[in-house]
Image (tube, helix red, strand yellow):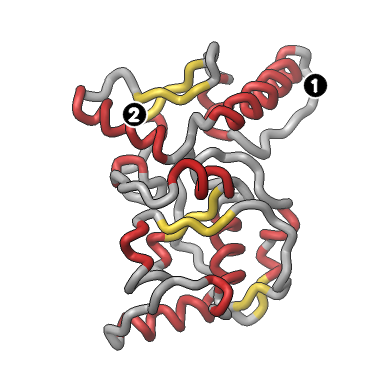
Amino acid sequence: MRKLNKSKILSSKYKEWLDNLDQSHENHGTYNSTNNVHYIDVVMNLLHVQRGLCAFTEVKLCSQQLIDEKNWVDGKYINRKPEILGQLDHWNPDLKKEKSWNWDNFFYISSDINIRVKSKKVVDEILKPDTENYDPIKFLEYDAKSHIFIPNSNLDKIKYERVKKMILILGINYDPIIDLRKEYLEDKLACKRFGLDYEINQFVTAYSMISKV
């Protein structure tokens, strides 16, 4: 799970709307994606930041063409029905009641992770990928045999257990993802061994760790 920099907001119309709400100390209202004109703008800006990948599992959710900057005109995303996978996730689900459109609380993730795994579980900021202190190398290791992420063995006991719990909550080792990741990485590593051309367009953190082993 990569560190994410969400400071680049291409969907400036959404940002302007959000800033006006916050400056006037207004609640955002209960979250409902279908009645907000900024929904697609938020989603596609997140996917731009996340390079088209699920923020947690790094499985590919859309093509790179869809998240190119040319798709934004005057602060709006021009394609109102992009073909993408996944769902908008509220990191802290408690904020959905009053601060439901808070940019800092948004990630875009795999639908299965959002519905079947994370859902409304309580989260720990230790693995929030857009925070200043998050560092995948500091908090995570990759087990090349079982193709799962584990807490970094250098962490103290308390942080180790916190990271272990969040790995489960974020679905980073969700069983179907493990199989996809294993097959993908083994194929890429085979290309590397034989000197064949290849590119890494998903599971980038796992690849960066396993390719150094």
Closer to the camera, 206 or 69?
206
Q: Residue at x 76, y 29 (%)?
A: 198
**Figure quadrant of residue 168:** top left
Badge nearest the viewer, 1 or 2:
2
Residue 50 at x, y percent in the picture: 55, 51
Q: In the rendered image of this protein, does residue 162 appear above or below residue 69?
A: above
Could you say whether the residue bearing mark 2 is in a helix, strand or loop?
A: helix
Q: In the rendered image of this protein, does residue 51 appear above or below residue 30?
A: above
Residue 28 at x, y percent in the picture: 38, 78
Residue 174 at x, y percent in the picture: 52, 32
Q: Residue at x 43, y 40 (%)?
A: 170
Residue 196's label in the rendered image is 1
* Gap in angstroms between the C-alphas marked 1 and 2: 36 Å
Residue 164's label in the rendered image is 2
Could you say whether the residue bearing mark 1 is in a helix, strand or loop?
A: loop
Closer to the camera, 94 or 22?
94
Amino acid type, label 2: Lys
Q: Residue at x 67, y 59 (%)?
A: 67
Amino acid type, label 1: Leu
Residue 128 at x, y percent in the picture: 37, 46
Q: In the rendered image of this protein, does residue 194 appear above or below residue 125?
A: above
